[in-house]
Amino acid sequence: MSQVLPPPPLWRGRSVLERPDPWRLVPGLAAAAAAYLAFSPVIFLVYGTLAHREPGGILFINYLRAYTAPGAARMLGNSLAYASGGAVLALLLGTVLAWLLERTNTAFRGGLYVLAIVPLILPGVLFSIAWIFLLSPNIGLINMAARSLGLASAPFNIYSLAGMIWVDGLHNSPLAFLLMSAAFRAMNPALEESAWVSGAGLGTGLRRITLPLLVPSLLSVFLLLFIRNLGNFEVPALIGRPAGIEVFTSKIWAATRRYPLDFGLAGVYAVTLLLLTSLALFVNSRLVRDARRYATVTGESGRGRVRDLGLGRLLVGAGVLVYLMVIVVLPLGVLLWNSLLPFFMPPSQAALAALTLGNYAAAFAYPQVSRGLQNSVLLAAGTAVLVMGIAASVSWLIIRSRARGRWLLDVVATVPITFSGVVIGVGLIWTYLTLPVPIYGTLWILLIAYLTRFLPYGVRACSAALVQIDRALEDVGEVSGATWGPRFRRIVLPLLRPALLAGGTYILVVTVREFSSSVLLWGPRAEVFSVVLFDLWQSGLFQQVSALGSVLCAGLIVLASGFWWLSRRHGLSPG
Amino acid sequence: MVHVEGLAKQFRVGARTIPAVRGVTFSIPRGAFFTLLGPSGCGKTTILRCIAGLEQPDTGAVWVDGRLVYSRTGGTAVPPHLRDLGVVFQSYAIWPHMTVYQNVAFPLEVRHRPAREIRQRVREVLELVGLAGLETRPAPNLSGGQQQRLALARALVHAPKVLLLDEPLSNLDAKLRAQLGRELRAIQRRVEITTCYVTHDQAEALALSDLVGVMTEGRLVQTGPPQEVYARPRDPFVAGFVGAANLLPGVLQSVNGLALVETACGPLRCTPPIGLAPGGDVLLCVRPEDISLTTEPPAAAGRNVWRGVLEEIVFGGESSEAYVRVAAVSLRVRNSGATLPPAGSTVYVAFSPERCVAVRPSALP
């Protein structure tokens, strides 16, 4: 097939017209940064656990040592019991709440919906502390109230596996609620309505249609909560350790704190945690694929109306309100109450007379408090800006470019989701003790930890927004003669602005709250606020911790309201 | 039978209330195929959901098979699972976690029928809808048409008193739609079930129904057999929505056997309107296919004949449409077969008075 092509016209000469564009390097650099962040901690973590041994020792000596250590089996059992117990409780509460708010006409639904999301904002450290104030056998307000009613001994003991599961389940129930609400919304209500008109009453319909249809979603949400709990360190640190209940995260932390430091042991437990998490996520991805097979033709979706509870709607609404009081108002209230008292007192005339703001003054007088606050704000701002910047470029490469290996970049951007905070912490310790970069114990290593942890969320927010933006808008820019740099700066970024703002605010909130990486990586003069709170708590400064906690909660609620307002205004969904 | 009396329903959207149904009354005789026809948002699906019990009307009453199932004032509200109905939803709502057999057996199982009877009845009804042999197939592995048949089988298996269908054909392609529509009608005749069918497709409604109720903006504006609704619209909305129509404003002059109406194109004779007095404004409705078009003046022979200018011809395959200007009015004429003169020619249009109906300009207050 010999075809004579016309000679290329002279004016197509690209090198003549197009100036070199340094901006063209940006996506490449961002991709490289994302890849480095995702892979360096894992590589050095695995390398460290294998290489760190006595000369001549066997390759897997650290693994052998860790798995045969006394208490290793009990620790594994505790971890699984805590993680699954908390997940089941959260799933139960969240699913019932989601059904009531999505499928019935429970009273005050609008207000309850907003209230139900608030606990997501509260840091785990403070939520755990608040419940210690309520359910500790000695100082817990609820136990004190029970004893004043004549009970001989305290009825509740938070320092137990049940206590850990209770606090964790309550704290995660809003997340379960959000995810299950989404599952209900994705399910065509006509499926349930047709069971109803076929002759099935409420119970039969729920048992034979609603629940079986929700099974893939329930399993998937359970696994996500399970993974979160495995990596959770707040509850094990504050409740588990005093009770002598060790789990993966607390074992890892202990190994990096005691003398002699045992990074080998910490590394092995971190690798094990990573493997468990990856396995759960793999199973989850299969489940999600199965769930998609369940999708049916939907006509007018969202047309489904709610089930009329009659007068019961007021009763159920009141019940939900009480539950939300328990998970929102009670913890916040007890923190605030304690912050205003010189020492523990149950509410009484005398206590009211003793109210003082002294704890606030005293707490902020500690130098590490103001330093921690400053560091946290600085790190949060830096993380938010860098994450969203890298995320915008990386998302553009994944969604828009035709570069080979885009799928690899997608993987790179998702992999860190499997890393819990503790795994990132140990991984980075190994990385920067091995590499000749002296940032261990400084704010820089914290910044890297936060970037690694939260980049996937940024990429997800940007990708979702970018998919919505018509590619032709950029093509027009190209046809008009703009090179990549101006196109990205003057077309893509402004269009992404709502997503960047909302995503950035979300990153601010989660960075300020971050605890499980920070507690492994902080150093002298490089404290962050959540770690300072934990430190003061361990020193027994309970009233001052309450004061600082109240301030932090107020700040986070303001930030989260900003996020909510931004998302609403730009019609984005949170998450 | 089904009887709906003074049914009204409002929806709240934020702070606003939107009236979906504004006082509708109708009866479906036993064994009849009744269609609620109207554009989307006219309230027809809301009425269907009120009959099913999935929605509670604000006012009014509903009887199913002689039993009062809903009455606001009487405080009666029978829940859907006790109304003994079959419903086919627009999305079919086939349960994806069950097989074909399990889907169909469900209504019998929740009624605790003996296993023998369930097996036999499911087989019968699957045969009826043409799905015999697919019992063990997982429900999501069915085509659109098969899902529609399955939904119908599930709605009929427990021999309900009334069958409700909410746009059951709208998710299918045109060819399948026509075929399944005919099958649906044949099955309905065979089991002689009282049926209420909801659609926005006027061709579907005319082809399938014993009775058609035309709805707009929450009101039922005309009910009658399809032929009557088409040939004798009593409302300009019905004339325009059911088939195409030329609508000409005029003033009713006199009624003497035929009615005489003065229009912008000249005087015209038409079928005498019901309940309209001379001197009042009327709207004349003439179907495009009832107007003949010639280049020579035709013999009047009692017909209305006007002279006009052929403005535009739109070729449409089996028939063409011509737009003829008479005075200030443009008339739409459907012309099958005969070749048309070029645009700009002087032509004559003619139609018989029997084919021309006068209606009140707007029946809606």
Image (cartoon, grey):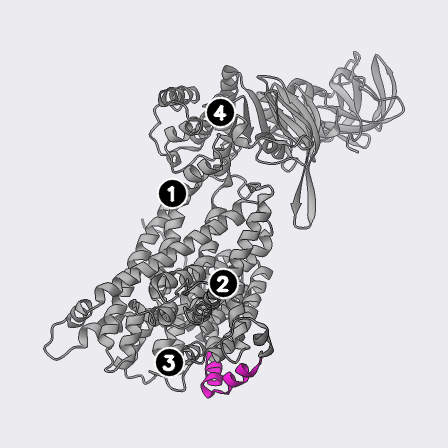
The Cα–Cα distance between marks 4 and 3, rounded to whole angstroms, is 70 Å
Q: Position of residue A11 (x, y in %)?
A: 47, 66
Q: Nearer the viewer, residue A329 or A350?
A: A350
The residue singled out by tag 2 in the image is A149
Nearer to us: label 4 or label 2: 2
Circle on res. A522: 3
What's under tag 3, amino acid-wise? Trp
Seen at 34% across and 53% down, the residue is A284
The residue singled out by tag 4 in the image is B180
Circle on res. A293: 1
Label 1 marks a residue whose chain is A
Does the magenta portion include A366?
yes
The Cα–Cα distance between marks 1 and 4, rounded to whole angstroms, is 26 Å
Query: Could you tell which of marks 3 and 2 lies nearer the N-terminus?
Result: 2
Corner quadrant of residue B147: top left
Label 3 crowd (10 A; few <14 / some 14-19 / many >=20): many
Query: Could you tell which of marks 3 and 1 lies nearer the N-terminus?
Result: 1
Magenta region, main secondary structure: helix
Nearer to us: label 1 or label 4: 1
The Cα–Cα distance between marks 1 and 2, rounded to whole angstroms, is 56 Å
Label 2 marks a residue whose chain is A
